[in-house]
């Protein structure tokens, strides 16, 4: 099943640190998933459009800059505008606990913080895709 999972990972905004997202990309690839990494300094709209173009199951957005409460609402809005509300949206990086709850209420499927072990990341992606079912 993992061979069929497609994931797009993105860094949104001015955050210039991408070591963590590259580690995540590697662990997902090692687990047999197709992973696309868009690179640094993308807009929310660019990452949603790229995720649609790549026909991914999961859009993972890494944020360390504190811009999560502005970036994720824009991402969610764009997903709705493009009619892909069934795309799984994950967040990662450095996000305060109180904001994790708010983001999940907005529609982010899960938040995987910077200290999440690689096997938990892989298991979470597989579980979310399995629970969502075929698109």
Image (cartoon, rainbow, N blue to C red):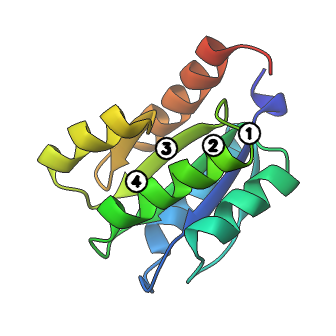
Q: Residue under circle 3?
A: 90
Q: For marks 4 and 2, give the one nearer the viewer.
A: 2
Q: Nearer the viewer, residue 60 or 43?
A: 43
The quadrant where residue 116 appears? top left
The label number, if any, that marks residue 83 in the structure image: 1
- Mark 4–mark 2 Cα distance, whole angstroms, equals 21 Å
As drawn, which residue projects farthest toward the front?
Answer: 81
The local secondary structure at tag 1 comes to loop
- Sequence order check: which comes first, mark 1 or mark 3? 1
Q: Earlier in the sequence, mark 4 or mark 2?
A: 2
From the viewer's perspective, is residue 113 above or below residue 22?
above
Q: Residue 130 appears at what percent x and percent y?
A: 65, 15
Badge 4 marks a residue whose secondary structure is strand
What is the spatial separation of the Cα atoms under label 1 and label 3, in whole angstroms? Answer: 18 Å
Is the C-beta separation of discs 2 and 1 under 8 Å? yes
Q: Which residue is mark 4?
A: 92
Q: Name the mark on residue 98.
A: none
Give the residue at x 32% y 43%.
103
- Quarter of the picture containing the C terminus is top right
- Which mark is on residue 80? 2
- Horizontal side, residue 21 vs residue 87: left or right: left
**Secondary structure beneath label 3:** strand
Which is more N-terminal, label 1 or label 4?
1
Residue drawn at point x = 59 percent, y = 65 percent: 10
Measuring from the top left, give residue 15's x and y in whole percent.
41, 82
Q: Quadrant of residue 64?
A: bottom left
Residue nearest the observer in this picture, 56 or 24 = 56
N-terminal of the pair, mark 2 or mark 3, is: 2
Residue drawn at the location 44% of the way across and 35% of the way down: 107
56 horizontally vs 129: left or right? right
């Amino acid at each position: 099943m993992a061979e069929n999972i497609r994931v797009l990972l993105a860094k949104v905004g001015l955050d210039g640190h991408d070591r963590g997202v590259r580690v995540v990309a590697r662990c997902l690839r090692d687990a047999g998933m197709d992973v696309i990494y868009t690179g640094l300094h993308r807009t929310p709209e660019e990452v949603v459009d790229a995720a649609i173009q790549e026909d991914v199951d999961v859009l993972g957005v890494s944020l360390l800059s504190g811009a999560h409460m502005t970036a994720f609402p824009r991402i969610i809005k764009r997903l709705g505008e493009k009619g892909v509300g069934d795309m799984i949206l994950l967040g990662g990086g450095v996000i305060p606990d109180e904001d994790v709850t708010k983001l999940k209420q907005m529609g982010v499927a899960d938040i995987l913080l910077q200290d999440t072990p690689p096997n938990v990341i892989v298991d979470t992606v597989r579980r979310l895709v399995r629970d969502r079912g075929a698109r």
